[in-house]
Image (spheres, helix red, strand yellow):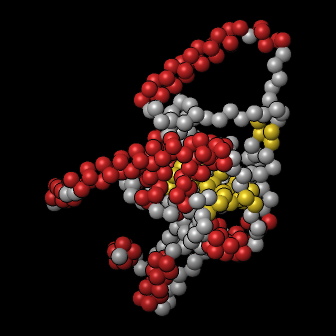
Amino acid sequence: KIFDNIAEETNHRRQTLLFSATLTHALEKLQEIITKKDNDVKPVIINLLPTIDEVKTELATNSSLDQRYLLCPEAIKIVYLVECILDIKFKQLIIFCQTKKQANLIHKVLLSLGFDGPEFNLNPVLLNSNLKQNLRFAALETFRSLKSKILVTTDIANRGLDLPQVDLVINFNCPKSPIVYIHRVGRTCRKPDFRYEQPIIPQTDDDDDNDDDDDDDDNDDAEQNRKRKIYAKHNQNSLKPKKHKISKCQTSVYLGKSITLITQYDLELFKAIESYIGIKMDAQEVDEKNVTQIIKQTAIAIKEAEIRIEQEEQESNRYPNIKQNKSMNKRQKLK
């Protein structure tokens, strides 16, 4: 309809260029409409995106992407997700969920567990189609600027976004199709020269000469401890980060990693994905003792998140016409 309005108001001897991140069914339909109206006009479509076959080949031969699965019970799948976040080192993480409701729940669970606090400083952000456009841009900008390390989203973010610092993708649900899986895991390994590397600098006697620097560090540590105490006082259910022991320089041979959480109900879907991309994935190792230790805290966080979501829904239902009335008032003013 918008295209028709533009066509009526412009010169017929024009050249129209239409750009899109994806070639959708709506654009294909638009091509048919243009051709029907004028047989002399034949739109030319240039698709710069790689084909599915090309992406399949890249995934099957990409030695820089570590693709794994994690088999876990449906009832405590969120607990396994939390354990993955605690256990795996990453620069930025995208968590893909099947529905907007599920993404909202997981986002609130992570906040309840303290992942936005000074202990972790991961600041999870939420991105789904329920958010207004300005809030979507704000969430993406927060994530892209590295102010946030975790993005919880739906398949709205599985294509068209260039987030080069993402080195971990977790599929909270097994994707319903191999195509969706390909697009999701394609969000990582997007920066060719990025590898995780953490050098360990040995302590020497010369370090004693830097007393002023040590005093500054002590002041910073004191301020951080003060913030932690304040946060812990208001969020008693928050988790504690793990201390990773590193004995020497640790370098990963992978540019990125993907983990797909599967349950007893997802085995056929998962086998179809493996068959489609031509890869037999390895299992992600998880310490079951660690999972057991965080079940209670995670269960409390889930309950708190559900209560918050219910309260938000009640507020929304209480004032359902506010947004509509504001829109009508704007239209009347324009008239």
Report the side of 216 relative to 194 (left or right).
left
Exactly how many numbered labels are in the figure? 0
Please tell me in which quadrant of the rendered image residue 57 appears.
bottom right
Q: Name which residue lies at 74% across and 64% down.
A: 281
Q: Quadrant of the N terminus?
A: bottom left
For this rendering, which residue is in front, 92 or 191? 92
Task: Give the percent coordinates (x, y) of residue 231.
Answer: 46, 28
Q: Name which residue lies at 83% across and 23% down.
A: 202
Report the side of 90 relative to 252 (left or right).
left
Q: Name which residue lies at 48% across and 73% down.
A: 16
Task: Give the percent coordinates (x, y) of residue 26.
Answer: 46, 77
For this rendering, which residue is in front, 312 or 323? 312
Vertical comparison of 181 with 225: above or below: below
For this rendering, which residue is in front, 110 or 72? 72
Vertical comparison of 150 with 332: above or below: above
Q: Quadrant of the C terminus?
A: bottom left
Q: Name which residue lies at 75% across and 33% down.
A: 245
Q: Can residue 96 be seen in this view?
A: no
Report the side of 84 relative to 151 (left or right).
right
Q: Is residue 250 visible?
A: yes
Task: Give the percent coordinates (x, y) of residue 7.
Answer: 38, 76
Report the side of 64 relative to 219 (left or right).
right
Vertical comparison of 81 with 185: above or below: above
Task: Give the percent coordinates (x, y) of residue 322.
Answer: 20, 54
